[in-house]
Image (tube, rainbow, N blue to C red):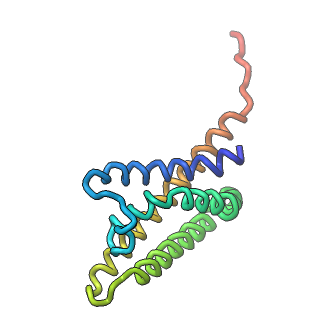
């Protein structure tokens, strides 16, 4: 079950991102020259070209960080879940801001910086929401399968 909790959320997330990239490929060809343009299509080109590396990173992150966090949080109360969610949201915002700042061209003004920051935050938030929904469904399925079935009483 642990292998399923490591692989399935990451594969579902990558499947969603792959579908988005694949559906946009006819309009915007994904080439290495697209990477670094500071827009959403450059991020999609990066994903389409480096997905094996990103997948390996996602699986390692899931195994080393997210599964232990999930196992800890699922036995805690609502306040611990809220704090964990707020910390993940803060990490998403900070990483999105840092990446946006790295690829931002100051001569373009602040609008591209903030719009790309918003896109990156959305992408990460969707990734983690889908990830935790899949983990929740896996744990819910596991607990419903392990509940003892009471025998029917003959009337």
* Residue in front for this viewpoint, 54 or 155: 54
The residue drawn where x is 31% and y is 57% is: 29
The residue drawn where x is 34% and y is 67% is: 40
The residue drawn where x is 52% and y is 60% is: 128
Horizontal and vertical percent for residue 146?
A: 72, 35
Image: 5 above or below 98:
above
Horizontal and vertical percent for residue 130?
A: 49, 53
Left or right: 103 with respect to 61? left
Horizontal and vertical percent for residue 8?
A: 59, 46
Image: 150 above or below 104:
above
What is the count of numbered marks?
A: 0
Left or right: 73 with respect to 112? right
Left or right: 110 with respect to 128? left
Location of the C terminus (image quadrant) = top right
Q: Quadrant of residue 144?
A: top right
Image: 32 above or below 48:
below
* Residue in front for this viewpoint, 124 or 149: 124
Location of the N terminus (image quadrant) = top right
Horizontal and vertical percent for residue 41?
A: 33, 64
Image: 103 above or below 88:
below
Q: In this view, which residue lies farthest toward the bottom? A: 107
Q: In this view, which residue lies farthest toward the top? A: 155
């Amino acid at each position: 079950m642990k292998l399923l909790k490591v692989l399935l959320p990451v594969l579902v997330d990558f499947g969603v991102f792959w579908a988005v990239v694949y559906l946009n490929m006819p309009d915007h060809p994904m080439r290495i020259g697209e990477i670094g343009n500071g827009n959403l299509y450059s991020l999609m080109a990066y994903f389409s070209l480096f997905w094996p590396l990103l997948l390996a990173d996602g699986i390692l992150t899931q195994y080393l960080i997210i599964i232990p966090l999930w196992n800890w949080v699922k036995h805690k109360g609502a306040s611990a879940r809220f704090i964990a969610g707020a910390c993940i949201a803060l990490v998403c915002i900070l990483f999105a801001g840092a990446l946006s700042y790295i690829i931002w061209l100051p001569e373009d003004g602040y609008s591209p910086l903030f719009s790309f920051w918003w896109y990156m935050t959305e992408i990460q938030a969707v990734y983690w929401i889908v990830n935790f929904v899949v983990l929740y469904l896996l744990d819910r399925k596991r607990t419903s399968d392990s509940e003892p079935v009471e025998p029917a009483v003959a009337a």
